[in-house]
Image (spheres, rainbow, N blue to C red):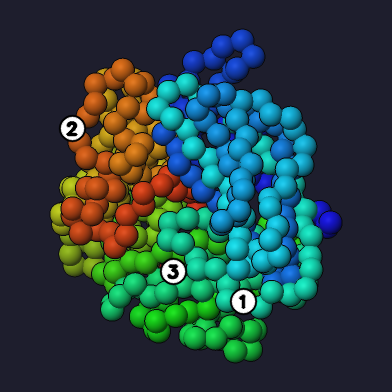
Amino acid sequence: MQEVSWQYRVGGGTGVFELPSDPNCVSTTGNQCPHYINNINNGVYVSANQNVKQIDFRVDSFESEACCDSLALSRAGLAQTKLQGTPTTGWYSTPNDGTSLERKPALLSFVTDFSITNRGFNIGRARVCCGVADTSDPVFLTQITRHSGVLLGNNDTVYYKIANLGAGQHQWVALKGPAGADFDLYARCGSLPTPTQYNFRGFSVNAQEFIDIPPTCPLLYIAVNSFRGAGQFDIYMDFHAANSHHTMSAGFDFVPSAAQITQITATLQGAARRFFGATEGQQIIDRVDVYTNGSCSNCNGRACEICFKNSGGTGLSPVCSAGTISIFQGYFGSPGGVAHELGHRWFCAGDEYVNGSQWQCGHSIMANPFGDQHNMCIDRNHKRDGNPLATATSLPPAWTQAANGGAVVTTPTTTPDNYDYSDFDFNELVGTIVTH
């Protein structure tokens, strides 16, 4: 078997990565904070090329609530291995029925209940076993779900496919791979793409690629190809309406210094990236034009859609309606804070607070403080997240509010990954900032 770089980490024992931490954590002896959060139902599919028939995972640490919080390793139609409590560390196998991981990927499914969390787990390595190529059709990418995978070296390729949901809908695909590698992304209508035959591609000198695809054809094939290097990649896909792309204007109610312009530019770009991640690409800020003339009523002759105000406070935004978003000094250097306000304006979501220090939803950028929360609340994780005894809120989950406001095409039923996209470059297609 060939070992490959691959990692999935959740919880305080190893640092919080794929999923948020519990905002109401209480440390006990041998079980220090931070912990993973309650009400999770998160799945990660893991693929490899047509020759790979089996993948094993190395568990380096694991601590969960013994009765009720578990990680299942499985493949469709085959037996699963369930880890919970404090299982033995070491290698765990996924079953092998002769089908390739490209056609039938492994699934790692982490599920937690509504109370009692723990330090989490660290899967620090994978290894694969190859056989005769299985050239069956590849697996469909699933919306709002991370499909992870491994590329074994230069020119290795993993294929996927996407079905178009309906007329007028765009679809995006984002790829992130390891530092130092050069992975590329290709899409082609009806046939497997190659580096010379494709309809769309994400093509740069690193392993971060992004493509936004207009209505094209009923069935798209996707290729993740290693131009140089090996290791883990993560690939995401979702759909959105054409009118979910936004160009905004921003100004100041004072004359900003050069340092303030630099700070605000970085904040706006970071906010656009984080907002993309929080909404799973359902709402996209393509570009923000920043006007530095000292007037929020004159962004190219019109009122600015975002106004940076030289006074104390954080932010204030209309909810699901046109109008100016006010950003005060407390959010000048806070991409997360500005993304929170974009959540009001474009995602139609309200604040998600409850009972003072107890959050309604510890999975949400609409809560306060943001901490390491980079998503929006779904039905499953909304009403009693940090404290099951807290008064339930009457406010619908953010995704429900967004759906009611017409801001989304698809709504997740499981917990999305917690990736904030703050370091993702989007091939310069999201969060472009132009200063005037």
Residue beneath disc 3: 172
Foreground residue among 302 and 397: 397
Residue 1 seen by the camera: yes
Residue lying at 31% horizontally and 35% vertically, measured from the top left:
382
Which secondary structure lies at badge 3? strand
Around disc 3, counting alpha carbons within 10 Å, would you say few (fewer than 14), some (14 to 19), or many (20 or more)? some
Foreground residue among 403 and 427: 403
Residue beneath disc 1: 136
Residue 14: where, in percent of width, then height? 65, 32
Q: Report which quarter residue 415 is drawn in.
A: top left
Cβ–Cβ under 8 Å for marks 2 and 1: no
Residue 425 seen by the camera: no
Amino acid type of disc 1? Ser
Question: Separation of disc 2 and disc 3 at Cα?
Answer: 33 Å
**Front label number (3 vs 1):** 1
**Total count of labels:** 3
Q: Earlier in the sequence, mark 2 or mark 3?
A: 3
Q: Quadrant of the N terminus?
A: bottom right
Residue lying at 28% horizontally and 34% vertically, measured from the top left:
352
Amino acid type of disc 2? Ser
Residue 337: where, in percent of width, then height? 36, 41
Residue lying at 50% horizontally and 65% vertically, measured from the top left:
141
